[in-house]
Amino acid sequence: MAFKVIRGDITTMKVDAIVNAANTTLLGSGGVDGAIHRAAGPELLAACRLLHGCQTGEAKITPGFKLPAKFVIHTPGPIWRGGHQHEAELLHNSYQNSLNLADQNHCVSVAFPSISTGVYRFPLQAGAKIAVTTIREFLKTAQSVKDVTMVCFDEGTYQAYLEVQK
Ligand code: ADP
């Protein structure tokens, strides 16, 4: 089992599943969500329409269509509202439920973006800590998932994850 942190663009990852930091409609938006929909092609939006949304912290799966990844796991992370609206627990749930779904679908390799730390404003260092802790704990008992990569798009995010994973 292995966990690693890299700097890059998640839409280029040749893994079994990439995770999308979606919103609850699952109908696309900006940021990593927009990039994934552009790279996967319009079939992804059509597949997402059939899912009828997703609650914060839950996760749903679709094919990857034109992406190099086999699947996309869509999870709406929490919007940061000051920290007293269960944001930390919900962010943990987003990682945990995404990993469970990857495992149930026999995925070996999974790539994550930094969920909620963009437009949703979850504090970066705290968000990185939750991501790394949840992934490491999960890998101890995973059935199928063996390789998890955190794909950091910008330098600040990359540095925060390098610091937290020490
Ligand atoms: P959220 O709404 O969950 O905060 P965002 O898409 O705004 O989601 O940001 C989440 C993280 O995804 C940010 O660190 C942002 O820099 C990053 N990101 C944006 N595009 C990509 C991409 N193509 N690959 C990986 N990460 C990306």
Image: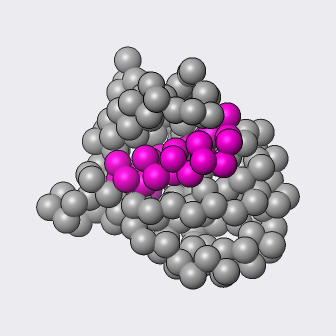
Left or right, residue 134 beside residue 74: left
What colour scheme has been applied to the protein in the rendered image? one colour
In the image, what residue occupies the spot 35% across and 48% down?
Answer: 92
Task: Name the residue nearer the viewer: 89 or 42.
Answer: 89
Q: From what the image shows, is residue 29 above or below residue 143? A: below
- From where the camera sits, is residue 35 visible? no
Instruction: Report x, y in % for residue 112.
Output: 56, 44
Look at the image and tell me in which quarter the C terminus lies: top left
Q: Quadrant of the N terminus?
A: top right
Using the image, determine if residue 148 lies above or below residue 116: above
Q: Residue at x 67, y 80 (%)?
A: 50
Residue 70 placed where, x, y %?
A: 77, 49
Q: Nearer the viewer, residue 55 or 68?
A: 55
Which residue occupies the extreme top position in the image?
A: 166
Outermost right residue: 66
Q: Position of residue 145 (x, y in %)?
A: 60, 34
Q: Is 120 a magenta residue?
A: no
**Number of numbered tags placed on the structure image:** 0
Magenta residues span 91-119
Between 115 and 50, the residue placed more toward the observer is 50
Residue sitting at x 28%, y 42%: 126
Indicate the quadrant where residue 129 lies: top left
In the displayed image of the protein, which residue is found farthest to the left?
Answer: 84
Would residue 98 be counted in the magenta stretch?
yes
Q: Can residue 60 be seen in this snapshot? A: yes
x then y, percent, for residue 165: 40, 24
Q: Relative to 80, is 1 on the left or the right?
A: right
Query: Residue visible at 33% across and 40% down?
Result: 130
Q: Nearer the viewer, residue 151 or 157?
A: 151
